[in-house]
Image: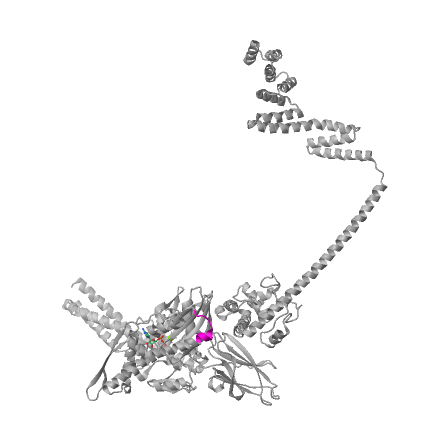
Amino acid sequence: MERIIGIDLGTTNSCVAIVEGGQPTVLPNKGGYKTTPSVIAISENGKRLVGQIAKRQAVTNATNTVYAAKRLMGRRWDSTAVQTMIETVPYSLVEGDNEDARIQLRNRVYSIPEISSVILQEMRLIAEEYTNDSITKAVITVPAYFNDAQRQATRDAGRIAGLDVLRIINEPTAAALSYGFGKEIDRTVAVYDLGGGTFDISILEISNGVFEVLATAGDTFLGGEDFDGRIIMDWLVLDFAREHRIDLRQDKMALQRLRDAAEKAKCDLSGTQQTEINLPFIISAGGSEALHLQKTLTREKLESLTIDLVERTIKICRQVVEEAGEKIDDVLLVGGMTRMPLVQQKVKEFFGVEPLRGVHPDEVVALGAAIQGAALLSDHQPVLLLDVTPQSLGIMIHGGLFSVLIPQNTTVPTSKSHTFTTVKNNQTSVKIIVLQGEHEEAKKNELLGEFILTGLRSAPKGEVEIEVTFEINADGIVSVSARDPETGKEQAITVTATSGLTEDELQRMMQENQDYLVDVRADEALMKAKDDVQRVLADIGRIFPKVQALLSGSDFGEDALRKAEGVLERGRDALNGNDLESLEHANEALTRTLNMFRGVLQKIG
Amino acid sequence: MVEAGKPYSKVFADFNGVSPQDAEYLRAHPFGYIPGAPYRKPGEERFGRFEFDKRALLNRCDLSIARRKEVIFLFTLLGKIDHFEFFEIEATDDRKAIKKAFFGISRRFHPDTFFKADLGVYKPQIEKIFRYASDVYELMLADATFRETYARAVTARDAAYRASLEQARQAKQDAQTRQAQRAAEDRKALLSERLTQNTLARRARKPNPVKEGLERAKRYYEQGMQMYEAKDFVRAASMFQLAMGLDEANETYRQTYERVKTKANQTKSDIYWGRGQTQESIGRDREAAVLFLRAVEAYPRADYCAHTAAILLKLGTDTHRAVDLASLASEADPQNIDYLMLLGQLYESAELYKKALTTFERALTLAPNDEEIKKAIKGLKKK
Ligand SMILES: Nc1ncnc2c1ncn2[C@@H]1O[C@H](COP(=O)(O)OP(=O)(O)O)[C@@H](O)[C@H]1O
Ligand SMILES: [Mg+2]
């Protein structure tokens, strides 16, 4: 059977799962962890680093380490999201060819889908390692609020990583899916997702294996990082300044170490009442003297530093529950931050039910994606997702206003047609501007695309009609086409939002990635061959003196020894070079010599 | 494009029975249309009178025939039947039911359900059905005024429809009653006419009882002959007897009767005999004796008579009848020693010793060495 993986491409961490024998399972990475930090870096020698390794070296290589790239997905260069990021991230953002944001690492500029594709590819490799099979199909999750451009960018990232993305689904829906999978339930469920950088709350209805999203909301700038920030800014930095009159924020390196330490302390406090923060040589105090940071953080203190952040999430919950207008039967906790006891307590207080924590909060989304993937490919769908449009879709009309054609929260797939008329006499072309968002003013919404319809009949204004059809498919991806009902002429214009990449660019990136993978694989093969040769050389070296003692003296023995020396010589030469073939030859010859030596020892020695 | 089934006839005007205000509101509203009558008549199953085009059902695709039918049916009637019929729910059902119904439709028509499948020509139809369903569903859930107005209108329409059905039924029934009444009257008139005619005819006809009797006798005789041929002698005999009574002068009837009578009696006798034997075999001698007596009355076969006499002797009742029967048997078969012995014993038990002695002695002349006879004579002489 065809294998399909589910990927939770998170802001902070990513996770991959697969359905095996009807059972969804999360796959561990090489380090044995079920989640992988969504961090990538380019090392000094131009190598790509992903996950834990990339995160660990961030302190020493901050400008070439990318985290939270998801925040930039499908964003235009001039968007607030990008402009805020420019000021806060250590890596450098540059404007791309298509008004998109790109990242410069060492001497190369990467598009955001490219960066994300590195993580997706890592997920794919984890799955390939696990299944010992090649993986080409995936379902990827995105936040419910992601617009068309952001979804398209995610899809492109998948393509670059060599994945056929069968479906993009919403994270809360995926979480609900993994909760409701295999259960005969009829319930209304709230999915509370507090991750590293974002907060999402969704209300879903589950009935008969059908999952329907009723309402969804969130805050894209509220997450674990803000909790870390409170520890750093409101406590560590403040106290340090009070004590030593030094502002630790001035030192990038120190700040990064503080960030890591704060996060670790926060995580520890989910299990214990207090923890040590220990950062020796945090900063130099002028001259050769260095200062250390050593403090004890209690859970109580952490809670008092962050309670208002938790309250903010509850306030959003209240709005959404009101909007959905349904009694909530269950609450599902998703995201690493929901491990924090204070979060659990506040959620329980608000909803009045014990939140479900049977599953790991940082794995449920990937599990749900895998379940959806398996469902799509199975003959008898055990589950069906009824997703809704994240944002309203419409066009710009006279006076710069936004006219909504497909409102927010419409079940997808859907399509709506609208008839426009010309506004000028003898107008032969019309420009249609497609927008997505909730603002009345057209320009305050996200521009999806624009196209010009030409070849209209020349007639007085208002007499020519154009029927424009807007369509959103099950992925939430939009296309627009136009038709002249009078002539029946289908202008067959289909606008699909771009992720900021043109098809050519996409093709090039896919190729480059392929090449890179081939290079990496060749490198790995070379390394392995060298390891092998080195090991055999060492084995021979260990018994060589003994064998030499036994063999020297006889003509035959001397001859054998001479030959062996030759083999060893060639082996060492191969080791210095980078030729896979000669390494393999050397390995073969060396292994024969080793076996011969062992035989000699056994017989004579 | 798949050909539609037969278009369903339109007897009722659109919005039939709907209040003018509601009709006006709904006419102006997208998805507000209400057909004049429900598509399914009461008691009709899901696809009602829908006729499927066989060729349309055979288009190549991965769907089962049942699914194809569903697609063709819903697609053809899309926008032509009311939303409640489309969702297969009642106008009185609440939001929850609408939701449930929509989930059901989704399970069957959402594109994800067919992710792998080749839908052939049905693909655009399925897409249209799902979109239609979700549009209606969202409208019904989101717009309470619309939902209520629509439900009220459909309820009114249904009431009007039912009323017109009832009216039609009543009219039909009245017509039937009237027709039945007319038929009854016609029948009565016909009958009385026939009666008068019969009376007239009877009066005009001269009665002739003799001729009638002879004719009946002849009929009985013929029936009797048929029964005779079927070997039903008992009933044949009674037929001939009837014929004989009605036509006493007829020799043929009498001779035939005589000839059949014996056979009939033999048959009767055998039947009684058989039943008597059954009774005897289970030890009910008294009941057996009654049946045996009937048998010998019907036809006195020597062995039947002897056996009946013996059983009467055993029971010690009706000795005289027994003596008669035993003598009858012995007369019929004078050489039979057993019969003579039986007769002798009966005489003896009736204390007619002399007669008994003569009988035993006659037996002895037939079997001079029989020890039993000698013993009987010796016993008798003592008395
Ligand atoms: N045991 C824990 N206690 C508190 N916070 C935790 C714990 N484990 C992880 N986190 C926090 O959860 C966040 C990551 O959550 P995750 O769901 O993986 O993020 P995302 O969905 O944004 O990728 C980080 O801020 C991390 O510090
Ligand atoms: Mg997440």
Residue A514 in sight here: no
Question: Which quadrant, please, contains the C terminus of chain B?
Answer: top right
Question: Which quadrant, please, contains the N terminus of chain B?
Answer: bottom right
At 75% from the left edge and 52% from the top edge, which residue is drawn?
Answer: B184
Quadrant for ligand 1?
Answer: bottom left
Q: Is residue A423 left or right of residue B183?
A: left
- Choose top left, top right, bottom left or bottom right for residue A454: bottom right
Q: Is residue B377 above or below residue A363?
A: above
Residue B162 in sight here: yes
Magenta stretch: residue B7 in it?
A: no
At 42% from the left edge and 66% from the top edge, which residue is drawn?
Answer: A181
User: Magenta segment range?
Assistant: A320-328
Query: A452 and A394: which one is in front?
Result: A394
- Choose top left, top right, bottom left or bottom right for residue B86: bottom right
Question: Which residue ends up furthest to the bottom in the rendered image?
Answer: A425
Residue B21, given in percent of the width and then of the height, sits at: 62, 75
Residue A284, given in percent of the width and then of the height, sits at: 22, 86
Residue B299, given in percent of the width and then of the height, sits at: 66, 25
